Amino acid sequence: MARYRHLPIWKAALELAVHLEQAVRSFPRYHKYTLGSELRQTAQRLCRLVARANDARETRALVLDDLVLTVEEMKTLLTLAKEVGAFAQFNDFAWNVNFNNGNTNANNHDNDNHVRLVRGGA
């Protein structure tokens, strides 16, 4: 299996998964076991897809398509969680990651390649 732990997208996906694990703990009970579970599973799937995309040869395009769809699913779930008030304070968790050309950049919002993610904060 190819090495992927040095990739910026892997680091961002792992950071998202870790912070979502922490954020879901403070969700109200109603959201913790439904929406929170979906957020956690989707974040874990992102990590697995990054690893698979890095290792895939003939199927890389298919895995990347699945990765893009999973990012879109994550964006939808995060928006829903924000709108229903599942996050104690959404701004404590929010930050942006730009997935332009495989590089992460928290300050660039010039294109549609950025994703607003969530992290635990105090």
Image (cartoon, rainbow, N blue to C red):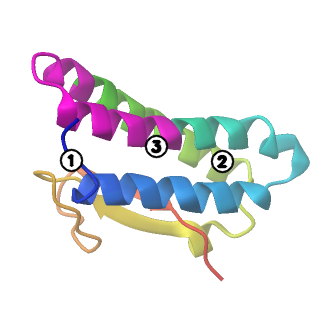
Q: Earlier in the sequence, mark 3 or mark 2?
A: 3
Mark 2: which amino acid? Ala
As shown in the figure, which amino acid type bears the numbered disc 3? Lys
Measured as percent of width and height from the top left, residue 28 is found at: 86, 53
> Which residue shows up at 26% across the image and 74% down it?
107
Q: CA distance from mark 1 to mark 3?
A: 27 Å
Q: Is residue 39 above or below residue 64?
A: below
Are the residues tagged 1 and 2 within 8 Å (C-beta)? no
**Residue that appears at 22% across and 50% down:** 113
**Apparent side of residue 7 relative to residue 82 in the rendered image (left or right):** left
> Which residue is under mark 3?
75
* Picture coordinates of residue 117, whole percent (x, y): 46, 58
SS for dot 2: helix
Q: Which residue is mark 2?
A: 81
Query: In the figure, is residue 56 to the left or right of 25?
Result: left
The stretch of residues the image draws in magenta is 43-64
Amino acid on which disc 1 is placed: Arg
Assess whether mark 3 and mark 1 are in contact (beta carbons under 8 angstroms).
no
Q: Which residue is mark 1?
A: 3
CA gap, disc 1 and disc 2: 33 Å
- Which mark is first along the chain, 3 or 1? 1
Q: Which mark is residue 34?
A: none
| Type of secondary structure dominating the magenta stretch | helix
Rendered view: 52 above or below 11: above
In the image, residue 86 lies at what x, y percent?
74, 53
> Is 54 within the magenta?
yes
Q: Residue at x 61, y 43 (%)?
A: 40
Front position among marks 1 and 3: 1
